[in-house]
């Protein structure tokens, strides 16, 4: 998890990276905002972790920011974790930004939100990776 940046306020920004990316991708963005912010560290999780594991890991970390309300910024598959985290934050959530994020319908898989051609290509990429 990155340390906070910006002035203390009642609203903090939580950054969720896409698959295979670490929090460093948000460094330049975080430097430009004037609010407490953090990236969520998922390094303790493994490839067998569930969406619930990712969501709970994020939830455990957000309170360390020391703010009452949050804006979530989710990139790519980080949008899926962000949407689940948003549900758990309830009224503490004041905004959600999806950056190239694909968010499936409730109960559907991540890949189900892609058009057929992209779904097939992503399945191939996941198998090769």
Image (cartoon, rainbow, N blue to C red):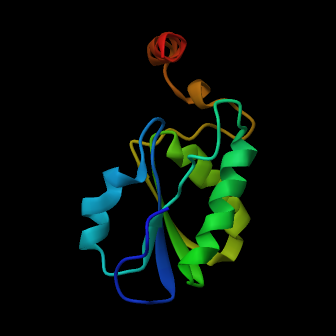
- Residue at image point 63% right, 58% down: 58
The answer to whether 25 appears left or right of 84 in the picture is left
Number of numbered tags placed on the structure image: 0
x, y percent for residue 24: 34, 53
Q: In which quarter of the image is residue 65?
A: bottom right
The outermost residue toward the front is 44
Q: Establish if 96 lies above or below 129.
A: below
x, y percent for residue 25: 33, 50
- Residue at image point 73% right, 46% down: 53
- Residue at image point 64% right, 35% down: 46
The answer to whether 25 appears left or right of 56 in the picture is left
Q: Quadrant of residue 89?
A: bottom right
- Residue at image point 57% right, 25% down: 111
The answer to whether 48 appears left or right of 18 in the picture is right
x, y percent for residue 34: 31, 81
Which residue occupies the foreground of this view, 20 or 119? 20
Which residue occupies the foreground of this view, 31 or 124? 31
Can the viewer see residue 96 in this picture? no
Can the viewer see residue 121 in this picture? yes
Q: Establish if 12 lies above or below 115.
A: below
Q: Quadrant of residue 127?
A: top right
The answer to whether 112 appears left or right of 117 in the picture is right
Which residue occupies the foreground of this view, 77 or 94? 77
x, y percent for residue 14: 49, 65
């Amino acid at each position: 998890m990155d340390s906070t940046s910006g002035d203390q306020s009642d609203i903090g920004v939580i950054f969720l990276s896409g698959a295979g990316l670490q929090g460093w991708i948000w460094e330049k963005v975080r430097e430009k905002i004037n609010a407490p912010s953090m990236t969520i560290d998922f390094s303790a999780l493994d490839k067998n972790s569930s969406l619930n594991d990712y969501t709970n890991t994020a939830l455990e970390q957000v309170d360390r920011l020391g703010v009452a309300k949050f804006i979530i910024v989710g990139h790519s598959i980080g949008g899926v974790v962000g949407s689940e985290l948003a549900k758990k934050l309830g009224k503490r959530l004041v905004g959600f930004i999806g950056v190239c994020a694909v968010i499936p319908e409730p109960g559907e898989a991540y890949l189900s939100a892609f058009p057929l051609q992209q779904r097939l290509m992503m399945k191939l990429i996941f198998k090769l990776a």
